[in-house]
Amino acid sequence: MAAGDKKKGIVAEFKEFISQGDVVDLAVAVVIGAAFAAIVKSFVDDILMQVIAAIGGQPDFSSLTINIGKGTIRYGSFLNAVIGFVIIAAAIFLVVKGVNKIREFRKKEVEAGDADPTELDVLEEIRDLLKENAGA
């Protein structure tokens, strides 16, 4: 096999790998996750921390430190990170809870027969109607 053939094989394998649904789904999830993180960070920094500042007088805790000997413990930055994490975790929890409620509602609809018919249901209905008309 020539070097060009080997390259084409690797390129073809790479294209196949990239076109698989899992890789594309993962890429979409990463992009959406990054956008969601930016929204939550803006909510924390621009809204929530400003409310905290209105109540407590300081919107950013990163300047809070403790000096011990020659060392400085920057516990304010840690506090900011904890607040951000708690809010992100709560937002994700609410999204997951909402999605689960929708799935539960949809499952109940399907079990009750109130759900929109699937393509297979419609095709079976058409088949049955055609059988009835053919027999008449």
Image: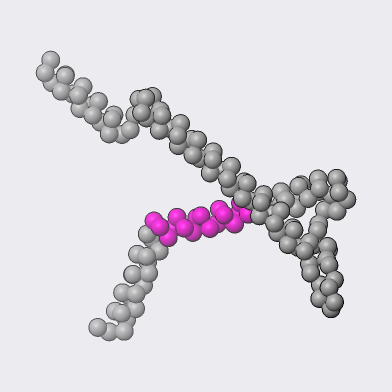
Q: Is residue 123 left or right of residue 90?
A: left
Residue at the outermost bottom position: 2
Report x, y in % for residue 3.
31, 84
For the point 55% across and 57% down, the residue is 31
Locate residue 54, reporting x and y percent.
Answer: 86, 46
Q: Residue at x 36, y 28 (%)?
A: 111
- Residue 135 in sight from this viewpoint: yes
| Numbered-mark total | 0
User: Residue pushed farthest right?
Assistant: 57
Figure check: 94 above or below 73: above
Which quadrant holds residue 67?
Answer: bottom right
Q: Which residue is most to the left?
A: 135
- Please tell me which residue lies in front, 35 or 8: 35
Nearer to us in this view, 17 or 61: 61
Range of residues picked out in magenta: 21-37
Position above or below: 45 against 2: above
Q: Position of residue 15 (x, y in %)?
A: 37, 66
Q: Nearer the viewer, residue 116 or 93?
A: 93
Query: Who's the residue at 11% across and 18% down the image?
Result: 135
Asked if residue 32 lies in the magenta stretch, the reply is: yes
Q: Please state if 50 lies on the left or on the right of 6 as rendered.
A: right
Q: How is the image coloured?
A: one colour
State the image coordinates of residue 14 (x, y, percent, origin top left): 37, 69
In the rendered structure, the answer to whether residue 120 lies left or right of residue 46 reads left
Q: Which image quarter is the N terminus in? A: bottom left
Dominant secondary structure, magenta: helix
Q: Is residue 36 magenta?
A: yes
Residue at figure coordinates x 79%, y 69% from the top left? 73
Q: Quadrant of the C terminus?
A: top left
Q: Is 63 drawn above or below residue 130 in the view shown? A: below
Q: Quadrant of residue 61?
A: bottom right
Q: Is residue 53 left or right of residue 39?
A: right
